[in-house]
Amino acid sequence: METKLIDGKQIAREIRAELKEKIASYAEKGLPAPKMVVILVGEDPASKVYVANKEKACGWIHMQSETIRMPEETTQEELLSVIRRLNEDDTVNGILVQLPVPKHIDSEAVLMAIDPAKDVDGFHVVNTGKLFTGASGGMVSCTPSGIVEMIKRSGISIEGKHCVIAGRSNIVGKPMALLMLQENATVTICHSRTTDIGRYTRDADIFIAAVGKPKMFGADMVKEGAVVIDVGIHRTEDGLCGDTDFDAMLGKVAAITPVPGGVGPMTIAMLLANCVKAYESQMGLKA
Ligand code: NAP
C-alpha cells in the first residue's frame, strides 16, 4: 500500500495565508491588527524557542505580538497582576502564558486568571467546559484542533471511524477525544494503565499517538490502511522522531504525519487562528 504523507507544514501554510488575508481585509477597513501577548517566566531553553517561534508566526501573518519576559524569581502575585492588566487592556486580544512556569507558581491559578475570551491556548475551564458540552464560541486547545483540521483538509473522513488515542493529558489526549467525538468518531482513550494497548491500537481506523515515548508504536501496533497521527516529538541521536516508528509504518498505513513537519506546525497555526477568532469576537466582527 502506498502511504500518503499528511503534510502539516503545507496545511499550516494554507491556514496562515487565509488568516493573513483576513487581517489584511480588516486593515483595509482601518481596523488594528489582532494582538497576542505571550508571557515567558524564567529561562527554560525549550520555552524560549517555542516563544520565538510563536513571535515569528505572528509576524508572518502581520499579527501584532508582544512577549513579556519575567525573571525566574517572579512571584505568583506579580504574574497574576500582569495577567489582570492584560485582561483589562482592550488592545490585547490573546494572552498565553508559556508553560511550564517555575515550580513555586501554581500553573492552574495562572491559567484560570486569564480572561476566557482571550485564552488562546484554550486551557481555561470555561473553554474546556464549552468543549465538553459542545457549546459554541469557545477556544479549543491548539494541538487537537490542529489535528482535526489537518485530517479534514487531507480529505480523510472521521465520521463513523474508530479513533484510538494513546494519551489522556489535558492538553492533548482529553480534548482530542472530545473533538473526535464531536466529529462523530467512536473514540477509545488509552493511557499508561491500559493493559494490552495493542488490542486497541490495532483496531484503530485513526490512531493518534500522544504518549511522549520515542517510537513506542511500531508497525505491529496498527492495522493495515489506518491513518496515523503522531503528536510526539523527541530529539534523539538520530535526529527528531515521534511516538511511532515512521519508517516501519510506510507501506502499511494509508496515511501518516511526519515528525517534524506534521502536528507541530499545525499547533502554531491554530494558535494564530484562535487569536484571530478572539479578536473577531471582541471587535464584534462576523467570522
Ligand atoms: P503528557 O502530559 O506527558 O501525557 C502523556 C500521556 O501518555 C499520559 O496520559 C500518559 O498516561 C500516557 N502514557 C505515557 N506512557 C504511556 C505508555 N507506556 N502507554 C500508554 N500511555 C502512556 O504529554 P502531552 O503533553 O500529552 O504530550 C504528549 C507528546 O506530545 C509529547 O511527546 C509532547 O512533546 C508532544 N506534544 C507535541 C505537540 C506538538 O505541537 N507537536 C504539542 C503538545 C505535545 P497517564 O495519564 O496514565 O500517565
Image (tube, rainbow, N blue to C red):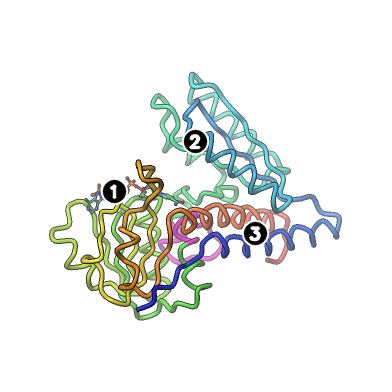
Left or right, residue 123 beside residue 119: left
Q: Amino acid at mark 3?
A: Arg
Q: Which residue is mark 1?
A: 213
- In the rendered image, the vertical position of residue 228 relative to residue 49, given as above or below: below
Q: Which residue is mark 3?
A: 16
Earlier sequence position, callout 3 versus callout 2 = 3
Q: Amino acid at mark 2?
A: Ser
- The verdict on label 1 being within 8 Å of ligand 1 is yes
> Percent from the top left, x then y, of residue 253?
33, 72
Calculate the distance from the C-alpha at mark 3 to the C-alpha at mark 1. Answer: 30 Å
Q: Residue at left 40%, top 24%?
A: 104
Q: Amino acid at mark 1?
A: Lys
Q: Residue at left 34%, top 50%?
A: 169
> Percent from the top left, x then y, of residue 238?
36, 45
Instruction: Please give the range of residues in magenta.
Output: 129-146
Earlier sequence position, callout 3 versus callout 1 = 3
> Percent from the top left, x then y, of residue 114?
54, 41
Q: Nearer the viewer, residue 166 or 136?
A: 166
Q: Which secondary structure lies at badge 3?
A: helix
* Mark 2: few/some/many CA within 10 Å (<14, 14-19, 20+): some
Q: Which residue is mark 2?
A: 47
The quarter in which the C terminus is drawn is bottom right
Calculate the distance from the C-alpha at mark 3 to the C-alpha at mark 2. Answer: 22 Å
Q: Residue at left 67%, top 37%?
A: 66
